[in-house]
Image (spheres, helix red, strand yellow):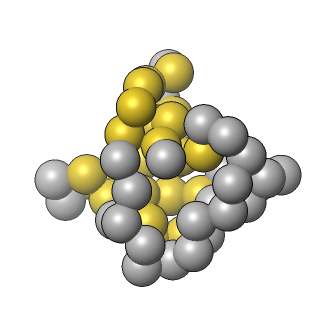
Amino acid sequence: LVVKTITKHDKGEIKINGTIWSAKTEDDAELAEGSECEIVAIQGATAIVT
């Protein structure tokens, strides 16, 4: 679940099992707060989502 909007230029935040992670999209798409997302990779402490 996206808890802070993810944009092409800025990382956002997602909630995974109650824990907040920084996140960016795989293809520079924007995901709005409240959107469902799928984790495709982890790079360091950042989740890569679609």
x and y percent of residue 25 in the render? 60, 45
Residue 40 appears in which quarter of the rendering?
top left
Residue at the far left in the pictured view: 17
Q: Is residue 17 above or below residue 27?
A: below
The count of marks equals 0
Residue at image x 36%, y 66%?
Answer: 36
> Looking at this rendering, what residue extends furthest in the right direction?
9
Percent x, y of residue 3: 44, 71
In front of the other: 7 or 27: 27
Please report the residue visible at 58 percent of the width from the left and 65 percent of the height from the top.
31
**Residue at x-position 83% and y-position 52%:** 9
Specify the quadrant that holds the N terminus.
bottom left
Residue ranking furthest to the top: 44
Image-based side of 33 in relation to 19, left or right: right
In this rendered view, identify the residue nearer to me: 42 or 36.
36
Q: Is residue 45 above or below residue 21?
A: above
> Residue 15's x, y, as percent?
32, 59
Q: Residue at x 67, y 62 (%)?
A: 30
Q: Of all residues shown, which one is farthest toward the bottom?
A: 34
Dividing the picture into quadrants, the one containing residue 4 is bottom right
Q: Is residue 50 above or below residue 14?
A: above
